[in-house]
Image (cartoon, rainbow, N blue to C red):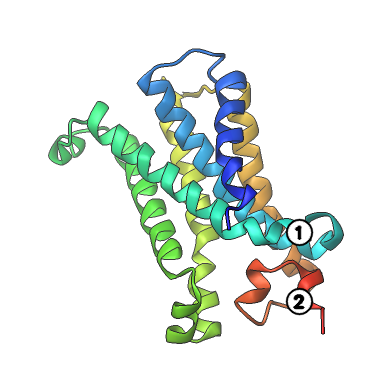
Amino acid sequence: MFSKAHFIPAVVMALLFVFYAYFAFSIPMLNKMLALGAVVLIGFSFALGPLTRFFPKTFGFYLAWRKAIGLWGFAFAVAHALISLHVYYGWDFFAMLAFPSLKQFALLTGAIAIALFAVMAFISNKAWVARLGYEKWRSVLRVGYFALLLAIVHFYLIEIKDGVFTVRPAGWLVLLFAIAVILLRFAVLFKGMPEKQSFEAHVTPPQELSRP
């Protein structure tokens, strides 16, 4: 059954085209939109968990969309990495070693973030829950917040020009949104809310889980 969740990436890209690209299209601009879109989609996927804890009636329904939105975000991140490698670096990995140390670190944080998101995407299914056991599976998925933090660092360092962080207003909103997602996770821990106890609890609206 086709999920409405698959429309979310198109909506995100349309909004970025209007409010970030200002209707201007080019491959470099598309690349930036994919990067920002990846952060928005992955961040929203992460945020649905805490938001459902605090506001189950408002956000609970969308928990079923969580996996699809996260996978689309990962796809955007991979597309961003491939376009960057082709357009900016010509697939010359050795040339990257000649970059200033700050830019090398920016590329490293981005690469590690994508690798961690890849692990999450690969194991986000019941088969891996059975293989690893729920507790270990959940622990592995928690690295996603560290990956999101690395993506924030990558974004910040890449957008530094002549020592100044320069980004359009919509870029600032995406950056602040990503930070807010991480803070939401800390809010759940601070409130001492009980952790989920099954794979279904991560992707099923709480109203459906409570049915007899």
- Give the quarter of the figure containing the N terminus: bottom right
Quarter location, residue 53? bottom right
Task: Decide if residue 62 is in sight here.
Answer: yes
Residue position marked by numbered label 2 in the rendering:
209
Is disc 1 placed on a helix, strand or loop? helix
Reply above or below: 211 against 78. Answer: below
Percent of width and height locating residue 151: 47, 46
| Residue wearing tag 1 | 61
Mark 2 neighbour class, 10 Å CA radius: few under 14, some 14 to 19, many 20 or more: few
Asked if labels 2 and 1 touch by Cβ distance under 8 angstroms, the answer is no
Quick check: 57 left or right of 35?
A: right
- Nearer to the camera, 156 or 185: 185
User: Where is 76 relative to 26, above or below?
Assistant: below
Q: Residue at x 75, y 78 (%)?
A: 194
Three-letter residue code for mark 2: Leu
- Return the x and y of residue 98 as percentages of the image width and height: 18, 34
